[in-house]
């Protein structure tokens, strides 16, 4: 595939390679799935860019979004980036103190908020943000202008030449986003990620999914975190349709409706799914219950390699009697689950693989866009207890004290307005100090064994 230099280059790339798809992205409104094809997507994005130009937005300005996952999040992301402005996505459930700090520290000019419930929590702090010009709501009005009004402003003021000039002026080393991470101490840190940081990461992982452009992914992890955001870019690169779940409470229903091939998640949800399955098994009686738990115990002994002929025969029986029902409960089409956010218990990995639902996990940080290492389906791609091989294009070395250091095109530009902290995090050779302790296995997989300071946490730490 041709080179993607800036994140918004994904749009013409999609239009060229997957023009026939009617569900590039989709969200649920009023109980119905609303789908957008690539031409609708591009039209809305361009009108947002025109509207932002009409508001006086230019290169380097900061615009924040505070929203749950929805197609509009993508429209704003691409529309902001095309103007050369910097997207500051903010998590919808942080503290009032953190909202005040981030909105002031990032010097945002405009904020887009999902709706009334969130506004009620934070609108009283807006007058204290000296750099803030205006707040828009994404859907509901409640005294604020809506995103639709910005789109209409753009539709009435199309400046195609200005948009082309703007896009042409943006380099892949320009900052695309500032993502604030909650540190263990002190104020949140603004991680500056360039277009190239994110692009290099999603292209490097793009050969991992065992599916093509016919596939659907369900997305529920917050897009304001780099993990889900990077994967959403990868889906668009590969032409995989993205469906945004209504909420965590409705994810099970949404999975059954959509029947996705890909789910990105965190171990907590996998634990809940497993516990729910086991609870159902406990309610069975007699022989059915015995067969159920025989299958579970067989699955917990699953090995990725070296399975005996006899084990494989037993697994076929367990699959026919039990595991195929698990797959059906998860939509029936799952080709891969990607787990991040924390370390995954080996028993979960074993049981899901035994049930014909492959799980891969990885490791990284916001500062590394995020992937440093990730499992894959190739030779030595998966080893239980590790986070997979180091990502191609990324160098990892282990310091004398065991700390994992990473260098590559995915390493952040630095912390916004904090050169001292940047120098502390990235050495003169370009290696980022992760704060995690680990080692490389003989076959090349990275194993996390601890945390140098503060809390032990693996797999795409925020």
Image: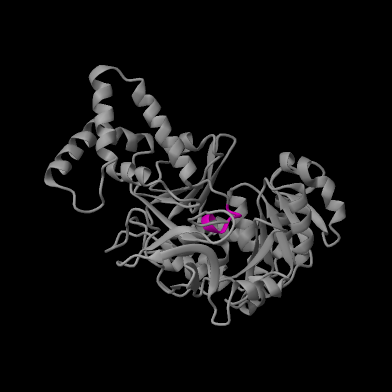
Return the x and y of residue 219 as percentages of the image width and height. Answer: 50, 48
In the rendered image, the vertical position of residue 411 relative to residue 69, given as above or below: below
Give the magenta part as a residue range.
223-228
Residue 362 appears left or right of 62:
left
Residue 131, quarter of picture:
bottom right
**What residue occupies the far left of the structure in this picture?**
309
Q: Nearer the viewer, residue 437 or 462?
A: 437
- Position of the N terminus, as image quadrant, is bottom left
Residue 445 position within the rendered picture, expressed as x and y whole percent measured from the top left: 36, 64
At a point 49% along the width and 69% down the height, the residue shown is 401
The residue under the point 25% across, 17% down is 286
Q: Quick check: 320 above or below 113?
A: above
Q: Position of residue 243 (x, y in %)?
A: 49, 47
Let me know if residue 236 appears in the view: no
The magenta stretch spans residue 13: no
In the picture, residue 42 is in which quadrant? bottom right
Which residue is painted at 56% across and 34% down in the image?
Answer: 31
């Amino acid at each position: 595939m041709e080179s993607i230099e800036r994140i918004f280059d994904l749009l013409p790339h999609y239009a060229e390679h997957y023009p026939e798809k009617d569900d590039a992205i989709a969200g649920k409104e009023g109980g119905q799935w609303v789908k957008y094809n690539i031409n609708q997507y591009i039209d809305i994005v361009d009108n947002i860019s025109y509207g932002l130009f009409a508001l006086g937005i230019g290169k380097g300005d900061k615009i924040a979004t505070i929203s749950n996952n929805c197609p509009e999040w993508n429209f704003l992301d691409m529309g902001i980036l095309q103007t050369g402005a910097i997207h500051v996505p903010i998590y919808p459930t942080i503290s009032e103190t953190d909202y005040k700090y981030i909105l002031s520290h990032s010097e945002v000019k405009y904020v887009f908020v999902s709706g009334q419930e969130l506004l009620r929590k934070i609108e009283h702090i807006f007058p204290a943000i000296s750099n803030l010009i205006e707040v828009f709501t994404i859907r509901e009005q409640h005294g604020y202008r809506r995103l639709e009004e910005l789109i209409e402003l753009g539709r009435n003021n199309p400046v195609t030449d200005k948009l082309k000039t703007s896009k042409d002026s943006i380099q892949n080393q320009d900052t695309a986003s500032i993502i604030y991470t909650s540190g263990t101490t002190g104020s949140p840190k603004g991680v500056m990620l360039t277009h190239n940081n994110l692009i290099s990461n999603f292209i490097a992982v793009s050969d991992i999914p065992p599916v093509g452009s016919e596939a659907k992914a369900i997305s529920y992890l917050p897009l304001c975190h780099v993990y889900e955001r990077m994967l959403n870019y990868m889906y668009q690169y590969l032409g995989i349709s993205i469906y945004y779940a209504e909420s965590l409470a409705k994810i099970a229903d949404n999975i059954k409706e959509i029947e996705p091939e890909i789910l990105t998640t965190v171990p907590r949800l996998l634990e809940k799914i497993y516990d729910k399955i086991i609870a159902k098994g406990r309610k069975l009686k007699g022989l059915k219950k015995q067969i159920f738990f025989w299958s579970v115990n067989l699955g917990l002994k699953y090995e990725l390699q070296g399975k005996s002929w006899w084990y494989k025969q037993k697994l076929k029986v367990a699959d026919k009697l039990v595991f195929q029902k698990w797959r059906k409960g998860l939509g029936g089409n799952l080709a891969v689950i990607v787990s991040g956010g924390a370390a995954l218990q080996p028993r979960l990995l074993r049981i899901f693989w035994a049930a014909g639902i492959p799980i891969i996990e990885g490791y990284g940080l916001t500062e590394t866009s995020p992937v440093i290492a990730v499992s894959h389906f190739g030779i030595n791609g998966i080893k239980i207890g590790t986070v997979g091989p180091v990502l191609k294009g990324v160098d990892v070395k282990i310091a004398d004290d065991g700390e994992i250091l990473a260098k590559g095109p995915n390493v952040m530009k630095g912390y916004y307005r904090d050169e001292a902290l940047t120098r502390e995090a990235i050495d003169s050779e370009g290696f980022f100090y992760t704060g995690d302790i680990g080692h490389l296995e003989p076959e090349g997989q990275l194993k996390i064994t601890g945390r140098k300071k503060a809390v032990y946490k693996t797999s795409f730490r925020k």
